[in-house]
Amino acid sequence: MIGRREFVGVAALGLLAGCASPRIGKETMEEMYGLIGQMKVADGKRGEVIAAMLAGTRDMPGNIAYMIAEDLDDPNSIWITEVWQTKTDHANSLQLPGVQEAIGKARAHITGFGTRVETKPIVRG
């Protein structure tokens, strides 16, 4: 059985393996920014938080991938894996009205945060 840290790394590699895209040039690949984080939610509210986060994170400029995964060992945890063209694109996304609305809807059900890892994605060419 693999530990959570190994799971996070394997999940990120799997996501990134499918991220090669014609819109990602060499310059962008050198600046890419990744984030993997665990969010803890109230009992029975995981589906509601996931729905709010997915609905509010569409059409984010600079976003290459945004994936939410249910933690199979903890029914009150989700993992969010993000890949961005730049770290600035990620920071700017937090000001978008849709993202702010999603955070507002989910906030009442978020009980905390676990592991958070910043990464520099490497996309196979």
Image: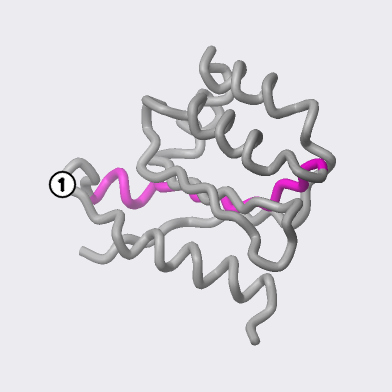
Q: Report the residue that reaches farthest toward the front.
A: 44
Residue 23 vs residue 115, the one in the foreground: 115
71 on left or right of 112:
left
Residue drawn where x is 30% and y is 54% of the image: 19
Residue drawn where x is 81% and y is 45% of the image: 43
Residue 44 vs residue 19, the one in the foreground: 44
43 on left or right of 39:
right
Q: Where is residue 87 in the image (x, y as percent from the top left)?
A: 50, 38
Query: Which region shows up in magenta?
Result: 26-42
Above or below for 123 versus 25: below
Residue drawn where x is 50% and y is 50% of the image: 34
Q: Is residue 40 magenta?
A: yes
Q: Where, by quadrant of the figure, is residue 71 drawn?
A: bottom right
Above or below for 64 versus 51: below
Q: Position of residue 117 (x, y in %)?
A: 64, 56
Above or below for 20 versus 93: below
11 on left or right of 23:
right
Q: Quick one: SS at disc 1?
A: loop
Q: Is residue 63 magenta?
A: no
Q: Residues within 10 Å of mark 1 (few under 14, many from 20)?
A: few
Q: Position of residue 11 (x, y in %)?
A: 50, 66
Q: Where is residue 67 in the image (x, y as percent from the top left)?
A: 47, 48
Q: Where, by quadrant of the figure, is residue 103 drawn?
A: top right
Q: Report the residue that reaches farthest toward the left.
A: 22
Q: Report the residue that reaches farthest toward the top.
A: 97
Q: Where, by quadrant of the figure, is residue 59 drawn?
A: top left
Amino acid type, mark 1: Pro
For mark 1, what is the residue? 22
Q: Looking at the rendering, in which quadrant would you find the C terminus?
A: bottom left
Q: Looking at the rendering, in which quadrant would you find the N terminus?
A: bottom right
45 on left or right of 2:
right
Residue drawn where x is 31% and y is 61% of the image: 123
